[in-house]
Amino acid sequence: MILQWLSAMRWYVMNLSRWLRMGRGSAIGQKTAHIDIERNLWHRYLHILILFLQMSGYRVELRHRWRFMASWASSDLFRMLKGLSLVGHGPRASTDLVISDRKDIVGALVLDADYFDPLGTQPHGYRIPMPMADSAYLLGVHERAPEIDAPREHAIFFFGNMDRSAYARSEPRTLFGCMDRCRLLDLIRNELPHRVHEPMDESSLAARGSRDIVLMDRTMHYIKPKDLPSVLARFDFFLAPSGVIMPLCHNLVEAMFAGCIPILQHPHLMDPPLIDGVNCLSFHDETSLVPALDRAKDLSASEVFAMRRAVRSYYDEHLAPAPVVQRLEAQKQGYVRLNAELASVRMLDRKIRATVSHEPVQPAS
């Protein structure tokens, strides 16, 4: 107990000192958003949501709460974001938007970490969509979309971490019915070795010859966030395997921003779902993976162009910061589902177990 208290005090002091140094007097905006969070389950997803609000002209104020301030999960927020106000009171009557994890604040949008639904069930409520990595927004990369009509290589590209110690966990398979990243990449290497090119750096990307599947390990060569969109925009397709503990991953959204057509096993996890043959190519299991990759190879230039436009339209209408904030403004109050990654996956696990055992789901602790 004493160690926990000391750890909490350490994070509190660290977060408060970072806030004091980050230019608290620069908080400006035409509208005000009041954020009242007791327990930060969302980590970077909450931080990105606050970034979205700032981009949409909001002055963001945070309610000072011990548990929120004394948490490692809030540390990146105070390390990276600027212009935040820290207040010791509830929202004023003139506040335009109130967001909280508390259910007792009248007129607030209540953030719910219950993000995922068991397979075969109908999703409910507004799920704030998967974003790009926070660096894309902090660096302004999201403001410089690649040209959608420029010629591209008719090839499938993947850039991401291939660390087997991290990307071979069971949750994508047992909870979502999807292959883990390592299993998917191994299948491609084993089934289609003649089509796979694995460059060691950007300079060898062009040395693929007739091979049309390019797999690039970020642990071998790191592409800087500011350069990633231009690299992605060289290719027609992006292979989107699972993340660490869930199928969704930031690189899917980054690829769609660049106009790449995603090839994935989890179109239903996007909100609204991606549509096979319209804005993605989907596969259901190991046996349908290779046919999906064959479809990508056989699509005509006109078909690819139409799908690329549909992908960019989906991003502009659903994934960009502005439409996300507009959706929150339109809803104004009630529950909103925000991905909390590990916490959300654990909630899904509990729901699946309760369904199997026919026991009621108990509230999360």
Image (spheres, grey):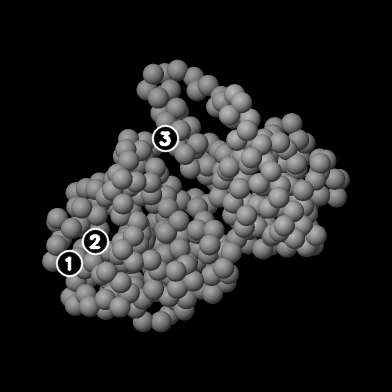
In space, the residues marked 2 and 3 are separated at their CA atoms by 27 Å
* Residue designated by label 2: 293
Circle 2 crowding by C-alpha within 10 Å: few under 14, some 14–19, many from 20: many
Callouts 2 and 1 close, C-beta under 8 Å = yes
Left/right placement of residue 101 relative to residue 214 reads: right
Residue picked out by circle 3:
118
Viewer-nearest residue: 254 or 285: 254
Q: How many marks?
A: 3
Amino acid type at circle 3 is Pro
Which SS class for mark 2? helix
Q: Residue at x 74, y 53 (%)?
A: 20
3D distance between C-alphas at marks 2 and 1: 10 Å
Which mark sits nearer the N-terminus, 2 or 3?
3
On screen, residue 201 above or below 44? below
Visible in this render: residue 33?
no
Single out the mark in the foreground, 3 or 1.
Answer: 1
Up-down: is 36 above or below 217?
A: above
Residue at image coords 52%, 56%: 131
Q: Where residue 86 appears, x then y in whole percent?
A: 77, 48
Q: Label 3 crowding class (10 Å Cα cut-off): few <14, some 14-19, many 20+?
A: some
Image position, residue 223 (x, y; %): 40, 68
**Residue occupying the far right of the picture:** 93
